[in-house]
Every structure is written in C-alpha cells, then in structure tokens.
Image (cartoon, grey):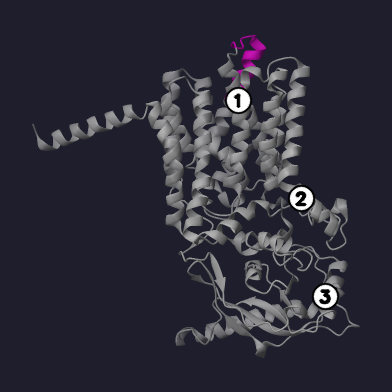
Amino acid sequence: MNPLRSSLLALEGAWRRLWQALDQPAVARAAAWLVPLAFGLLSLARGQDDNWDLHNYHFYNPYALMNGKIGLDLAPGQWQSYFNPTLDLLYYGLNRVLPAPAVGFVMGWLHGLNFVLLLALARLLLDRGAHRLALLLALAGCLGPGFLSELGNTMGDNLTSLCVLGALLLLLQAWSQLASSKALPVALLAGLVMGAGCGLKLTNATYAVALCLALLGVRGGLLRRVRAAFVFGVGVLGGIGITAGHWYWRMWQQFGNPLFPQFNDRFHAALAAPIGIGDTGWLPKGWAERLLWPFIFTLHPQRVIEISMTQLIWPMLYLAFLALAVRALRAAILGQLPALTPRRQRIGFLLVFCALAYLGWLNLFGIYRYLVPLELLAPLALWLVAHRLMPAQVARGVAGYALLLAAVAIWPVSNWGHAGWARAAARADVPPITAPAQSMVITVQGDPPLGWMVQFFPRELAFVSLGSGFPESAAYARRVADMMAARSGPMYVMLTASGAEPDVAPPEQREAALQHQADLVRRARVILDRYGITLHDDSCQIYSAYVGSSRQPYQLCRITPPAPASGVTSGVSSGIVP
C-alpha cells in the first residue's frame, strides 16, 4: 500500500476512535475538571491583567474599603470609586497571599468554571446520552469573543456569569416540581444565587428580571406560577443584600445615596450633581436599529465594545429566533401546537429567558461585555432552536456548520490589556511623605486613570480627583476647599509621565518628550486654575511604577492651595469624562 495512503488511513482511524471516545460519560466528567485548568493556563499565558478599569478602580476600591479610605479620599477612581468593591476583594486578597502569576491562573480557572455549568445545562436539555454533543456545545459557549477577551482579568463579567448560569441550572434541574410548592425552596435558592450576582455587579439585574418573568410561563396554575416567581424575586433581593447590602448601607450613611453617585437625580446626595449617570451612548438609535441591532453590531462592533471584535453568532441566533417565533405563531393560529414534553418545556424556558434577557440588555445597556452570560449560552440555544425548526438530520448539519463558522470567525481575539508577569501585580517607587495626615494628592486625569496608585502611598494621605470623571457639585468643591484648608501640606498633583521623560529618552525623541511633558503640565494647570490652585511645574519629579513588568511612570508636582477667601467653587464640573 502507498505509504501516504497508509498514513491517511491511520489518521482517519485515530480520528474516528477519538470522536467515539468523546461520546463517553467519563470523558465529559474528565473535561469538567480539565477544561477549567486549561483556561487557567491560557490566562497564565496571556500575562498580567492591565485593563483600564484595573487602573481606575479595581485596585483602589477594595484597598479603600480595607484601609479606611472611604470618606478620607474623594473619588480618586472617578465616579467608579463608589462601585461595590465586594467582587474585587477576591483579586485584592489573592494578590496579598499569592504571586501574581498564581493569581492569574486562579482567575482563569474560576472563569473556566462556566464550562462546567454549561456542560450540565447541555446534558440536561439534550437527548439522553448525547455526551459528545454536550461537551462540544459547552466548549463552543466558552469560545465567544466577549468571554475570551476578559479571560483572567478583573472586569467581573466572567465571574458573575457563574451566578446567572447557576441560577438557571438550579431551576431547570427542579423542573418537574417547579410549578408546585415543593420547588419553592429551589426557587428561593436560585434567587439567592442570581441576587448575589446582581449585588456583585448591578448590570446582571437584566438576567434576574428575565428569569423572574420566564417563571411566569411555567406550566401550572397561575397562582403557583406567580408564587414561584415571587419567591425567586425574594431570593434575588436576599442575594443582593448578602453581597451588596453592606455597601449600600455604607454609601447611605456616608453620602445619603445607596448607589452614590448613580441615580443622584433621585437621591440628591450633596457631593454629586443631580444626574443619573447612565451611559446611553451604546444603545441603538431608534426602532429600526433596535430591530436590526445584531446585524449592525456584527458589522460595526465599535457600536457595542471598545476593542476590535469579530463574531457571527448573534445574527444567526437572531434569525433563528425570528423563524421560531413565526412558526410558533402559525402553529397557534392553526391549532397545531406540539405536545410539550418536560424536555421541550425546559428548552422553551431557556429560550424565553434568553429572549427576555437580550431585550433587557438591548434597551438598558447595549454594552457587549454585559452580554457575556448570553454569549455563553448562544451555541446551545442555536442548536436547540435549529432542532425546533428542522428535521434532526438537517438541523445537525446546519447548526454544526454555523457554529463551526462562528467559532473560526472570532480569531484573532482581542483583549483589554496585559503586561508581562512580575511577582507583584503592581508596585511603585514612592517618595517620602513627611506628614501624610497633613498632605493631599490631587489627580486631574480621567484617562489614563491613576486610582491604582493610591495603594502605594501612606493610608493617611488624602487623594482627591478634580475635573475628571466624577459629577462634581458645589458641595464637592467646598469639601475639597475645606480639606485643603485643614491641612498644612505639602500638597501635590499627580500626573502620568508615560512618554514624557526627557532625561531617559533617546536624543531623537527628546524634543517630543519635552513637548509631551509640557502638554501634560499645561492641561493639568488648566484644570487646577479653575479651582484657584497653583501648579509649580519646576517641582515635578518622575517616579517609576509598574503593572506586572510594564513600567508606567508617574510624576508628582508641588501645588499651592487657593487663598481661603477665594474658595474653589468655580471648578464645579458639569459633566462626565467618558
């Protein structure tokens, strides 16, 4: 036999054996252990998380909570300084006890647990014994561009998605009893899990509402359905109380607004302007865009995300849902609705949840990162819808090739920023501060953010942001004036120094570095002048700081506060720096 033909036949035989082996229950059980470990290794290969939000508030918020900085500082992480820090305590705590690469591995492994929940959901909804199919659909769910872009980082969507998928799995596992009083404890537990995710990241509220509304469609008497939805809702409130209640109470006591500074048009906390802080710039414009949104953000991903992204799953799934809705409407009109077996009921519940959650996201956020739980479910949902629309043999081919195309199209996957590994996730050289309780540091930059630097300075040193992203009120400006008047100094303004180090720049770049340094100081002076604060540019000193192995220098410049009579009320900001 021809050696080439012999090799090809051997490869074909090996592939067939592997394909058959994937359909064994033991392989699925092994994958539930191994795939999260693989995601941990992938996170390790990517390097140190270095995203914008980490610089702004993921480092600062847990540090402030654990070190008595709330109320001492004023918004060094801009308005995000007052997000619930409970979720970030995980990353903060891990970095206190483990080297940074180990933390990166743990974060990737935790994110990889989404695969385990997806696998359990797929095995519950697919035909009995479809182990290989469940495995592949769960893996396909973890190959979405949103999930992969955040793998191992601190943005939180990949972690709180565990709460969304976990609550959904609990309800589907108790399906046979869901419309009876026997399932009320499960509905309560599912609500607690979902509520915990909402408390950790409030954007998950759309998923809580979607699950609650979907429960109203469970088969059974109206009273039983309402009771299950009500108990679930009580659980959601309890979960929010567990993970966020302490923070809402602290914000209420400190500022008079439990969600400070958000929704301040309702609560009117003195230190923030009376605005809602809703980022509506990502939402579709008008009904035409709403109806065509999956096609629009597939062709123009910058409408929903700040990084480059290629995906095809959403227009496919959208068309499939529309076809399913048309078919269901036709069957209802003709009185040809199929008998609903328990498995078909579970599938219907999942699809209703997905549709409601998408509509909630479409009308409230439009930010792709908040779609991660649905992105994880999308391949499974597409497979299930295809089998509702077509004969099984045709559906397998159509859905299989569609998912393969969607999986290939996402590469290369962008991310939110990584640096090389060092033992510490972040570190900085800090000059001696002789009297930190009498000193103050002001930041005037919204981008790049400098909130991450606070953790390296003495905790008694007050940090304040001016003219950046916080919606300052007149009372905020007066508070800053009072803080400066109560301190004898010295006082500083902190600026970035990246690209502005003339002393270390090559000769051909020195002129550009000098110009950049002058521009940084000029922009800072423009802001400080509005508050009557004088910046002494001849005092600026550059120091080294690092995220992982990436050097990100900063500078401190001496400032002189305004005369007591002048105050600083002229510097009130009228808007938000995006």
Residue contact at pointers 3 and 1, CB within 8 angstroms = no
Q: Where residue 450 appears, x then y in whole percent? A: 64, 69
Work out whether 312 lies above or below 301. above
The CA span between labels 3 and 2 is 27 Å
Q: Residue at x 76, y 38 (%)?
A: 237
Q: Which residue is mark 3?
A: 483
Instruction: Compare marks 3 and 1 and give the one earlier in the sequence.
Output: 1
**Of tags 2 and 1, which is closer to the observer?**
2
Residue range corresponding to the magenta coloring: 324-339
Q: CA distance from mark 2 to mark 1?
A: 31 Å
Q: Which residue is mark 1?
A: 172
Snapshot quadrant of residue 60: bottom right
Circle 2 residues within 10 Å: few <14, some 14–19, many ≥20: some
Q: Is residue 329 magenta?
A: yes
Instruction: Tell me, yes or no, if residue 577 can be seen here.
Output: no
Q: Which residue is mark 2?
A: 246
- The residue positioned 49% from the left and 38% from the top of the image is 115
Position of 386 with respect to 248 (left or right) is: left
Q: Is residue 170 magenta?
A: no
Q: Residues within 10 Å of mark 1 (few under 14, many from 20)?
A: many
Q: Are marks 2 and 1 in contact (CB under 8 Å)?
A: no
Inspect the image, locate mark 2, and give the three-letter code of the amino acid beneath it: His
Vertical relation: 430 (above or below) 422: below
Q: CA distance from mark 3 to mark 1?
A: 55 Å
Q: Quadrant of the C terminus?
A: bottom right
Instruction: State which quadrant residue 524 falls in.
Output: bottom right
Disc 1 marks a residue whose amino acid type is: Leu
Percent of width and height locating residue 234: 77, 33
State whether the magenta stretch is mostly helix, strand or loop. Answer: helix
* Depth check, front residue: 348 or 461: 461
Task: Identify the residue at image location x=75%, y=38%.
Answer: 238
Residue type, mark 3 in image: Met
